[in-house]
Image (cartoon, helix red, strand yellow):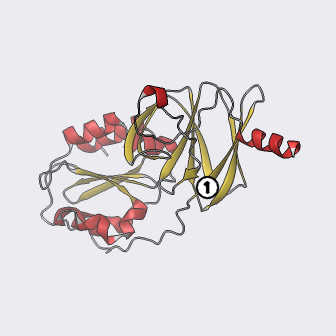
Amino acid sequence: MLATLSFLALLLAVGADVALPRASVPTVPVESQPEPAIVDTLAADEWYVIPSPTPLKVIASPDGIVDIEEDAGPLRLRGKFAGGTGLESRTIDSPRVYLITARTAGKIELLIIEADGTLTRQRLTVSGAGPRPPPVITVGPVKPVEPPSGLQVMLLIDQGDAVSALAAVNSVPVLQWMDANTTQTDGRPGWRRWDRSSLSDPDTLATESPTWRKLWADVGGNIPAGPQLVAISGTKVTTRPITTQPRLLQDLQAAKEGRL
């Protein structure tokens, strides 16, 4: 019995420098404020974020259920976070940031090892995305309906793309640049940021204007795989892979000046 209790205590131990995501709780008076529970679930479209002041070794057991990426902070992200309340923008102000995303459904145990050997173990139930059917699109020459003047931009990503690419398309400088430099279409800024997998759902484009539905129908079938910048000026369409925020801003400026 004592051995069992000791084992359970080890499973629940959290190192002093490991900050696992915790669920949001309603605000209550300070004297009865509950300790937020550590998040133990991860949806297909969420980030499970572990910030750390020092390098960690993060392992998932068994392998193949989640992807783990390490990046340097501070890091600004926009999306859904495990334990969060929907779509959010967050700045992860920490020297090291570990991002865990779902690959397939299953149950895992995270093993988080600090530099001094301290081990944190956390069980996690993962809701995988499952097979993604290819988008149903109409392939044809570029024939936009009443091509808008100036620059139109599409940013195409998947939640499984590299962290640097996801951070780039959600960064404030990139969003501000596109608001200021793309040509408004149908009363909105002339850019869209779409998850490739969502484009297989007719509802994704159902709320878009005829211009943008036609743009996607005309160019969507010829865009390379991976995170892509698509710059459209009349009938000219140019694509560039999205890698980092500085590179994306350079490509956007080149597209505006006709050098892309």
Please tell me in which quadrant of the rendered image residue 235 appears: bottom left
Q: Is residue 16 above or below residue 223?
A: above
* Residue 31 image point, x, y percent: 47, 26
Q: Is residue 239 left or right of residue 82?
A: left
Label 1 neighbourhood size at 10 Å, few (<14), some (14-19), many (20+)?
A: some
* Residue 24 image point, x, y percent: 46, 41
Examine the rendering and report whether any part of residue 153 can be seen: no
Q: Residue at x 13, y 52 (%)?
A: 149
Q: Residue at x 16, y 47 (%)?
A: 183
Q: Amino acid at mark 1?
A: Thr
The residue lying toward the viewer, choosing from 34 and 146, is 34
Q: Residue at x 18, y 63 (%)?
A: 209
Q: Is residue 130 left or right of residue 218?
A: right
Q: Residue at x 45, y 55 (%)?
A: 158
- Residue lying farthest front? 31
The residue lying toward the viewer, choosing from 28 and 260, is 28
Q: Is residue 166 left or right of residue 229?
A: right
* Residue 101 image point, x, y percent: 55, 50
Q: Is residue 23 left or right of residue 218?
A: right
Q: Which residue is mark 1?
A: 125
The residue lying toward the viewer, choosing from 174 and 255, is 174
* Residue 28 image point, x, y percent: 41, 33
Q: Is residue 75 above or below residue 129?
A: above
The residue lying toward the viewer, choosing from 209 and 42, is 42
Q: Secondary structure at mark 1?
A: strand
Examine the rendering and report whether any part of residue 204 can be seen: yes
